[in-house]
Amino acid sequence: MIATAHNRAGVLALEIYRDVLNAVRGDRLMRDAIRLQAEKLEVQDIVLDLNQFENVFLCGAGKASFGMAQYLAELLGERVSGGIVVTKEGHGGTIPGLEVVESSHPVPDDTSLDAGRRLLAFARQTGPNDLVLFALSGGASSLTEFPIEGVSLQDLQVLNRFLLASGFGIEQMNAIRSAISQTKHGGLGQAFLPSRVVVLVLSDVMGDNLDAIGSGPFWNSQSLEEIPVGVGSYWDNRTAFVASEFCGKPLSRLGIKIDDEYLSELLDRATTATRPPEADLSRRVSHRFIGSSQTARLVARRSAVARGLRIDESGAEPLVSDARVEGEKVARLALCLGSEDSICAIFGGEPTVILRGNGSGGRCQELACVASGLISGRSDLAILAGSTDGTDGPTDVAGAIVDGYSTARARAQGIDAETCLASSDSQLFLEACGGLIRTGPTQSNVNDVVLMIRADCA
């Protein structure tokens, strides 16, 4: 991990963050969720007799899918007949017997369409006597795509850039993406029918809603599958948002410059497109969660307590609104803490970002940039905002850490936080104050972790 701490609170924050990343790797969570006894594969409460299947295929899509599939391949060995795994560029590698495809995130490109085409073609070759173990994690929405007829790659890219800059939540964005895709909202699941599919889910969505994770490739309005209590926190069967809700939305209110007529026409086409009838996927498809944001927060809590920190329970509410609002909330909470002992508040979630300029940054960096100004002068405070997938927005930065003297260090370099925020250039400020965190690919994706720590310098 490439990062710098400038006080004791910062040192503790980086140690806790490192513990979280180590614990929520996809391969480690798979190890906890799956057992192989002779020819019986136990996936939590599901028991599969491998002798009953003609073939066992391993497939996956998402930023953590490579590590998840790699563990499965090592566990099952020669029992695996093949498969295809799609992950982000730079997050893959070699898995003997499997095809590993790297594609684009967060905006789809030709590689994303190629990955979607290949996954759909592979799915349609499976049969009723085949078992498919599918590793699903966040990022699949962009990494694996194949649009409905009449929607071009340019359409996809314009729409995705708009969504990423809009301030919409992940459920809203993925609902709109699903409306123009053949792989999303159960599309991939229908292609795999009638094979038996078990989807192993690493959730990056607060509430663990299956229609939003990777845009629900195995989940649609006909999915009435029961998820056992205690296996993930998903609790309802609600369908995705209707994309037409966003048609004609006055984009100027969001500070976004885009051709409204073009975007509305694209969304209109999506909602009126002719689609094949949706199959009931629950008869052949099962989902089981192996990890989520809750997993990361529990690890962070244990790590903080082990380091002598008292837990402040103010972090119970997830961070899901604008990163600037959330940054102010976390910083103001820090200023309200007493000074009698060492304290840690732990937040999870995924703030949204509204682009206001052409700078570089992401939701974690923007949150930290805002917070730094409010805690200025406090030598006992540090705030860390970090992704768990190693990528904050469209950057190679995982997140950021700031303390009470971050603004002073940046000003010494001639950089002002407010000026950077005005052009959505939080990365410039954080580079100047020494606050950037780079981890590289983590083989995980369970939302963001935000740590607020007060600790004496001595």
Image (cartoon, rainbow, N blue to C red):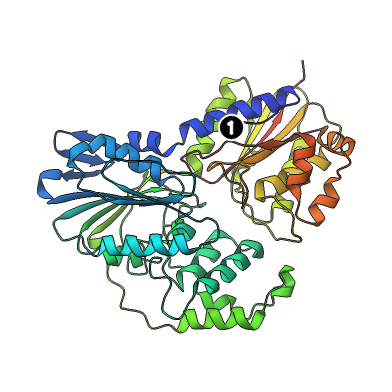
In this rendering, position of residue 170 left or right of residue 379: left
Kindly identify which residue carries mark 1. Answer: 17
In this rendering, position of residue 15 left or right of residue 84: right
Residue 455 in sight here: yes
Location of the C terminus by quadrant is: top right
Indicate the position of residue 89 as horizontal and vertical percent values.
Answer: 49, 49
Residue 237 in sight here: no
Quarter of the figure with residue 165:
bottom right
Question: Relative to 382, does residue 44 appear above or below in the rendering?
Answer: below
The amino acid type found where label 1 is placed reads Tyr
Question: Relative to 170, does residue 240 appear above or below in the rendering?
Answer: below
Indicate the position of residue 438 as horizontal and vertical percent values.
Answer: 62, 37
159, 342: nearer the viewer: 159
Residue drawn at (85%, 36%), measured in percent from left and top? 376
Question: Relative to 439, does residue 328 appear above or below in the rendering?
Answer: below
Location of the N terminus by quadrant is: top right
Q: For label 1, count other residues whose C-alpha is less than 10 Å away and answer few (under 14), some (14-19) or many (20+).
A: many
Of helix, strand and loop, which one carries label 1? helix
310, 259: nearer the viewer: 259
Indicate the position of residue 130 as horizontal and vertical percent values.
Answer: 17, 54
